[in-house]
Amino acid sequence: MAFNVRFGGKNYDIKNFLHDHPGGVNTLEKFKGRSINDVMIKYGHSVSAYHMLSDFKVDGNLTGSLSENGRIITKEDSGRDEKEIAFVEELENRLDWSKPLLSQLSKIAPHYEIWVNSAVYRKCRLFSSPILESLTYTPWYLVPAFWVPIILYLICTQYFEYVLCGDQCPANRLTTMQFLWHMALGFIIWTLLEYSLHRWVFHYDPGSSIIMIQLHFLIHGMHHKVPFDELRQVFPPIPAFVITCLLYAPARLLLTYPSVKVTGVLIGYLAYDMIHFYVHQGTPRDGSYLYAMKRYHSNHHFVNHDKAFGISSKIWDLAFNTFVQVKKLGISLRW
C-alpha cells in the first residue's frame, strides 16, 4: 500500500523509505496524505533530504512555480539554501544512473565532495562487467561466516602455544588472564584503527584527480552516496583479509605477542562491521547502546560528514574533538 506525502505541490510515495528514515517510522506515520513542507524545515533536514525526495516522486501534478531546472519553489525555500539544492540536482543530472557510475565520475569531478555527500535512495552499478560488479556486493552474513572460523582458530592455536603448552611452553608463556589482556589490548587497538581509517583514509580528500576520486568512491564514497544499499554496508572479506595480512607485518615488529593482539583486533573488526550493518538496517530500542549509535551514525551521514567518525563507540571522537551532540528528542524513534 502506498504511503503518499506532499511537498511543494508534488506527491511522493515514501513507503519503501519508512524503515530507513533516520528519524524513525513513527515520526512519519502522522503525515500520511499530508504536506511535509513545514516539518522538514522545523527539524532541520539536510540538502540530501530534499535531494532524495526526487527518488520517490509519484506524478507531475504541480501547484507551485518552478526553478530553471524544474525544481518546485515553495515559501519554505527561504529556510534553506535554494542555490545549493539546485546545484546538487544539476550535478545529479550529469550522470546516467542506468549505466556504470565509476566511469562517469569525471563529469562531477570538480564538485565530487558535494555530490557524494548528497545521498540518494537508489541502487548503483559500478562496473559494466557482471563479474566485477558481483564482487562489490557483500551480504552481511558472509562477514561472520568468513571471520568467525579464523578467529576461533587463532584463539585456540595461540592459547595452546602460550598457555596450555605443558613442557613445550616458550620462555614468554602467558597465564589465562595475561592472554585475555593481550586480546583485550588488541580490541582497544582496533577501536583506534576504526576511527583512524574512517577519518583519515575513508574521508581523505581526493582532490580533482579522477583516479583518486574513483578510488575514494570504491572505498567509501559509494556508501555515502547510496547509504541504504544493504549489500554495500559491510566490507568484503577477501580485501579485508589481504589488508590484515599487510598490517600483520609491521605488527610483528611493533607489538609483543602480535598474533594474540591481532586476534583481538579481528574480534573488534567483526564487532564493528556487524554494528555498522545493524545501525543502518536494525531496529534498536530507545535507551539501548545501539539506539544511540544509530542516531549518531545517521548524524554523520546526513548532517556532519566531517565529524562523528566513531561507529562502534564515540570514545575517539571525544579524544580527537570530532564528537557531535545529537539532538535530544521528546519521543522514542521506531524503525
Image: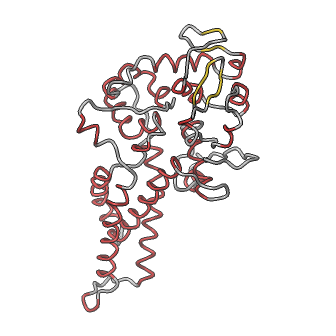
Residue furthest to the front in view is 1
Q: On the image, which quarter does residue 106 sit in?
A: top left
- Residue at image position (52%, 21%) is 88
Figure disc tally: 0
Q: On the image, which quarter does residue 160 sit in?
A: bottom left
Q: Is residue 169 above or below residue 290?
A: below
> Where is residue 24 shown, x and y percent of the image?
63, 43
Q: On the image, which quarter does residue 46 sit in?
A: top right
- Residue at image position (40%, 85%) is 175
Q: Is residue 72 above or below residue 149?
A: above
- Residue at image position (70%, 50%) is 332
Q: Is residue 199 above or below residue 43?
A: below
> Where is residue 313 shown, x and y percent of the image?
55, 56
In the rendered view, does 123 fall on the left or right side of 51? left
> Where is residue 192 shown, x and y percent of the image?
47, 56
Residue furthest to the right in view is 330
In the rendered view, does 114 fall on the left or right side of 162? right
In the rendered view, does 126 fall on the left or right side of 22? left
> Where is residue 6 shown, x and y percent of the image?
65, 24
Quadrant in which the N terminus is drawn:
top right
In the rendered view, does 183 fall on the left or right side of 10? left
